[in-house]
């Protein structure tokens, strides 16, 4: 009797597993495929769709999102619903739908950041910069490590710059720089440091504050010489010194530092090549350049 | 009587004989039905590969060799014919040969006016299973090898799908013709592997046109399927992806008919040839 019960239990478990599988994402994919086939044109160009067709499409898409909320694509579909309303200039509903992304899919950080950014731009389109700014600031606070979260401080500063609001613009750039430096300081060994550094460079480039940037980067390398980003930081500094500040000696010094201190870095070869180029340009020192090029050939015979 | 007319008549004589045997002893058809059931189970399992518990085994294989997208709707239906063909090629030398052996044994019993006994047929096929499996492996292995060579990328001439299908079809007919008498001669004449293969070649040499006809005529029913599979994405787009299952189910039905008819034709021809050799019947 016991063994029969055991078999019944195993069979029930198998059936349950099977049913869970059947009711899972496969049917979400299937439903989405059929919706896409039926309403594909409206999904792609919602602005041109008839009112009835548009609402049918929205309902069909919403049904998928509510029916399969844990399906990987549901968040993107919800986001697209918001975009569809934007295309039809129905900003109220667009905001509502994009807010659903932020509220219901918090694990999709990048998408949530994009949704919140779009909400901000909607306020901007309606001329409500105050509310837009509030949204952007909230975004930066909520999703600081997303690409959108990193872009937004610069976006705010650029907005002021475009509108000739010099004081606000300078303050916003200073805020952005402060934010980026803080993010790097918080986790200097993070793989995202080169990306944050890129935004740091952008912030200074837009203001033309190159010397300040070199100082910041120099401090970072001195403070964290053993991070993965250190050789890249030196390389960035060297390029700025050579091409913008026209300080070839400092650039050479920085390239030499990469060669000596980071022998395993993938930037080694380029640093050596740049050194050779500087030798030619700086003093027309052909012999020195030849020596550098020979070094490269010896070190990298296959390339 | 000239040779061509004699061969033409003999093919229809063989088919008439097969139909009589099947009408009198429907049990001969049972192994083919079982094989169709097995194919259906296999197809169902492959169709269910994205779901647990089947996904535990099949999903990693599909993911590794074809890619993640083939575990999702509707791309899973695009892969289904290829998976089914691979699975059938894999089970062919292991399972299908056994059922073919049973069919031959039952047909042999009926041919010599005995009442076909299922148990005796299975016993005989199981006893000679290794030989049957080796012959099955040689047949499928050779066919796959030749198709692989044919599909070698440098053969630019075969880049046209229609031409490739035609050549692959003719190749499969040629290979089937070469080995079609091997299993009947193992079961009926109790031949060893090499002797069975030689017997198959010798019978083919003696009856090339009849063999060609009884292999090619039913097999030509497969041609439309090849063209459907080539146009499958379009068909799925215009109807619905699940149509692949319908096509494959029909493919199984046709395969069942072809396998049964070709096997029985080869068996009856072998038996008739034996009768002719012993002088009891003039072929």
Image: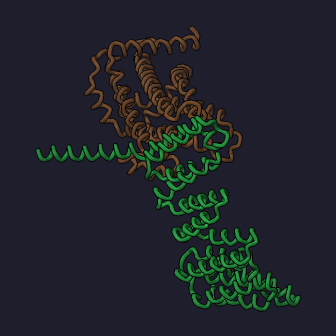
Chain colours: A green, B brown
Can residue B202 be seen by looking at this rendering? yes
Query: Relative to B41, is A9 on the left or the right?
Result: left
Query: Relative to B132, is A81 on the left or the right?
Result: right
Quadrant of residue A276 within the rendered picture: bottom right
Quick one: which residue is furthest to the top in this view? B1
Residue B58 drawn above or below residue B251 = below
Residue in the foreground of this view, choosing between A263 and B213: A263
Quick one: which residue is furthest to the right in this view? A284
Q: Where is residue A282 in the image (x, y as percent from the top left)?
A: 85, 88
Q: Where is residue B269 in the image (x, y as percent from the top left)?
A: 45, 20
Q: Where is residue B253 in the image (x, y as percent from the top left)?
A: 44, 26
How many numbered marks, from 0 up? 0
Report the quarter where the N terminus of chain A lies.
top left
Q: Which residue lies at the image location 40% right of the left edge and 34% below the top edge?
A: B39
Residue A46 drawn above or below residue B266 = below
Q: Which residue lies at the image location 51% right of the left edge and 68% below the top edge?
A: A142
Residue A147 drawn above or below residue B116 = below
Quick one: which residue is furthest to the left in this view? A1
Can residue B199 be seen by looking at this rendering? no
Report the quarter where the C terminus of chain A lies.
bottom right
Residue in the foreground of this view, choosing between A87 and A149: A87
Q: Position of residue A73 (x, y in %)?
A: 51, 51
Query: Relative to A133, is B113 on the left or the right?
Result: left
Residue in the foreground of this view, choosing between A218 and B261: A218
Residue A134 drawn above or below residue A219 = above
């Amino acid at each position: 009797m016991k063994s029969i019960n055991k078999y019944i239990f195993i069979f029930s478990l198998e059936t349950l597993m099977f049913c869970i599988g059947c009711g899972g994402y496969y049917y979400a994919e299937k439903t989405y495929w059929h919706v896409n086939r039926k309403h594909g044109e409206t999904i792609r160009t919602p602005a041109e769709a008839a009112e009835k067709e548009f609402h049918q499409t929205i309902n069909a898409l919403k049904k998928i999102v509510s029916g399969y909320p844990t399906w990987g694509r549901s968040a993107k579909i919800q986001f697209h619903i918001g975009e569809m309303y934007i295309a039809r200039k129905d900003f109220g509903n667009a905001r509502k739908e994009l807010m659903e992304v932020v509220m219901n899919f918090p694990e999709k950080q990048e998408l949530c950041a994009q949704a919140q950014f779009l909400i901000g731009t909607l306020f901007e389109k309606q001329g409500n910069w105050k509310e837009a700014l509030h949204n952007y600031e909230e975004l930066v606070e909520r999703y600081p490590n997303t690409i959108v979260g990193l872009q937004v401080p610069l976006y705010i500063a650029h907005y002021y710059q475009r509108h000739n609001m010099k004081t606000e613009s300078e303050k916003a750039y200073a805020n952005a720089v402060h934010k980026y430096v803080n993010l790097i300081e918080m986790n200097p060994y993070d793989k995202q440091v080169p990306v944050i550094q890129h935004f740091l460079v952008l912030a200074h480039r837009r203001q033309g504050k190159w010397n300040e940037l070199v100082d910041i980067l120099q401090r970072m390398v001195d403070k964290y010489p053993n991070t993965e980003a250190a050789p890249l930081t030196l390389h960035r500094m060297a390029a700025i010194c050579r091409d913008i500040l026209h300080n070839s000696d400092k650039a050479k010094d920085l390239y030499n530092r990469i060669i000596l201190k980071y022998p395993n870095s993938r930037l080694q070869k380029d640093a050596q090549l740049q050194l050779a180029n500087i030798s030619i340009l700086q003093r027309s020192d052909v012999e020195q350049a030849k020596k550098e090029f020979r070094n490269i050939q010896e070190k990298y015979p296959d390339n | 009587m000239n040779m061509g007319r004699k061969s033409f008549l003999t093919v229809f004589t063989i088919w008439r004989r097969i139909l009589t045997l099947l009408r009198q002893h429907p049990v001969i058809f049972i192994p083919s039905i079982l094989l169709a059931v097995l194919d259906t189970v296999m197809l169902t399992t492959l169709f269910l590969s994205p779901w647990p518990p089947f996904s535990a085994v099949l999903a990693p294989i599909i993911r590794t060799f074809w890619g993640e997208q083939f575990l999702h709707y509707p791309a899973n239906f695009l892969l289904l014919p290829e998976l089914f063909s691979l699975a059938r090629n894999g089970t062919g030398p292991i399972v299908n040969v056994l059922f073919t052996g049973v069919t031959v044994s039952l047909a042999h019993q009926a041919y010599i006016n005995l009442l076909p006994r299922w148990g005796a047929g299975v016993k005989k096929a199981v006893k000679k299973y290794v030989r049957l499996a080796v012959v099955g492996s040689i047949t499928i292995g050779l066919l796959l090898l030749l198709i692989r060579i044919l599909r070698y990328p440098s053969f630019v001439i075969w880049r046209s799908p229609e031409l490739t299908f035609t050549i692959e079809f003719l190749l499969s007919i040629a290979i089937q013709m070469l080995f079609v008498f091997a299993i009947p001669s193992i079961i009926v004449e109790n031949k060893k592997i090499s002797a069975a293969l030689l017997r198959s070649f010798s019978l083919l040499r003696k009856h090339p046109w009849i063999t060609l006809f009884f292999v090619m005529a039913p097999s030509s029913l497969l041609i439309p399927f090849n063209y459907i599979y080539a146009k499958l994405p379009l068909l799925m787009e215009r109807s619905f992806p699940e149509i692949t299952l319908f096509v494959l189910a029909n493919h199984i039905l046709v395969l069942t008919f072809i396998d049964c008819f070709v096997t029985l034709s080869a068996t009856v021809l072998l038996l008739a040839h034996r009768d002719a050799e012993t002088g009891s019947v003039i072929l």
